[in-house]
Amino acid sequence: MGSHMSFLGHKNLHERAETYLVQFRRFGNLGDIEKAIKYGGRALDSTPEGHPHISARLISLGVYYYERYRRLDNVGDINKSMDCYIRALEITPDNDPELQVRLYSVGILYGVRFARVEQVNDLNKCIEYLSLALHLTPNDHPDLAQRCTTLGASYTDRSQRSREIDDLQKAIGCYSHALVITPGGHPDLPRRHADLGVVYANRYRRTEEAADLENSIEYYSRALDLTPDDHPDLPRRLADLGVSYADQHRRTGKLEDLEKSIKYFSDALALTPEYHSDLARRCIDLGVSYTNRYRCSGETDDLMKSMEYYSRALDLTPDGHPDLQSRLAALGVSYTDRYRRMGEPADLEKSIECYSRALDLTPDAHPDLPRRHADLGVSYIDRYRRTGQFSDLEKSIESLSLALTLTPDDHSDLARRHVDLGLSYIDRYRRWGEIDDLQNSVRCYSRALDLTPDGHPEIPRRLAALGVSYTDRYRRMGEPADL
């Protein structure tokens, strides 16, 4: 074979490689792409330096390596593909019309490698090359909108790592330009609207600017209106709009927004296939909205539905999944709610079981770790008050103390956690009469009240709790100031 190949010129070698590429794409035989790489490499080696086709040979070999990467997921192939494209780019003259195409291709390959190995430098390089390509792309180029979209997606990816608002702003700029130049009736028009909905929703979660949330709803709604009934992205469009309406309900408290979130989540779930990777996530989203409606309406049916969807999500979540701990915690919350509504001891035991498992699975540096301790601590209080088992009271104080220690000073739950710990201290004081427990309850309630803003609906309850502790201390110590 070697002697036979030596008689083939670089043109014939290249043509043979291309034939094997076509066969691979048609039939999927791995041997064909191996042969394409083999002949493509020989074609490149036999092409003289300075030959006008050498850059094309490099690009072709890069394509073959990329095709094999897609098949085998071997990062070495993406590295070789990038090497070929970068070498081709380096010998491409500044006035060559292929320059913007090659810049774009190199940017895409950096993005592919970033998705594979998650090295942020690859994402930065991806943005650099895509930006250069976009700068050189003529205004009437048929790929201009797609290049804007691709760059916008890369800025979106980087914003999720960098937390920089500037990256989101640039993503909005790219997606907005792509939308403006996409003609009506174009098959990508729904996706252009959806892309903008995503970045506005992301920016709302950073800034809490109402206008960003309104924009996300507007673009998601338009994307949904343009999406055909049989389109595979229809469930995602419904789910995205449901998330934004759920966010709007949390912001405004309007029940109509919560009703819309339930409608869109229900429609999304109904259209999601049983094997789909987003099925569990959509069960969780719907469960959360039912939980929120239960807390607004007090309807037991909403509570039961929330538990149904949380349980289904948990059944779909494999061991080792990063969301397993949060899904256990969500189900624990519903068991707690049902226990407080119906008083069934089995629900309280289930809540403790779920919270304990969730806590065991939560990494030490995880931002939800304080909440995991707090949820478990509150359930131990509930069980102590039901059974009088002193060990539960001790566990509640231990868990709530850890939760408070781990809660940042600016966290919205800080006051609530002081109250919960104060409740446990006052319960222990009444059990054993230790003055330190009474003093700690006063300290916790006072701190909670200091953290509670004027007009907050919990002010009367927190004042009452502190008043009870002052009364207990007056009766114990006789200080007129406490009375």
Image (cartoon, grey):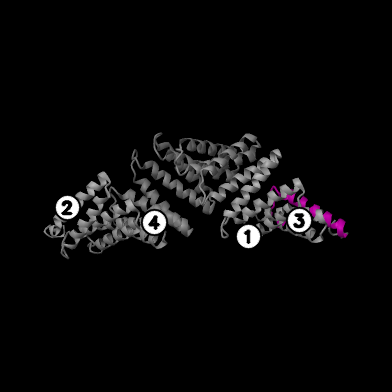
The secondary structure making up most of the magenta span is helix
Residue at the disc numbered 2 = 15
Q: Which residues are magenta?
A: 448-477
Instruction: First in sequence, mark 4 or 3: give its number.
Output: 4
Check if mark 3's residue and mark 2's residue have beta carbons within 8 Å: no
Q: Residue 121 appears in which quarter of the rendering?
A: bottom left
> Along the line of sight, which residue is nearer the eye, 249 or 280?
280
Q: Say the numbered circle drawn on residue 425.
A: 3
Mark 3 falls on what kind of element? helix
Instruction: First in sequence, mark 3 or 2: give its number.
Output: 2
Question: Is residue 301 located in the magenta-colored stretch of the structure?
Answer: no
Q: Quadrant of the N terminus?
A: bottom left
Mark 4 falls on what kind of element? helix
Vertical position of residue 257 compared to residue 8: above or below:
above
Residue at the disc numbered 1 = 406
| Residue depth check, mark 2 versus mark 1: number of the one nearer the observer | 2
> Along the line of sight, which residue is nearer the eye, 455 or 158?
158
Q: Position of residue 453 (x, y in %)?
A: 68, 53
Q: Position of residue 471 (x, y in %)?
A: 83, 54
Q: Amino acid at mark 1?
A: Leu
Residue at the disc numbered 4 = 116
Instruction: First in sequence, mark 2 or 4: give its number.
Output: 2
Q: Quadrant of the C terminus?
A: bottom right
| Residue depth check, mark 1 versus mark 4: number of the one nearer the observer | 4
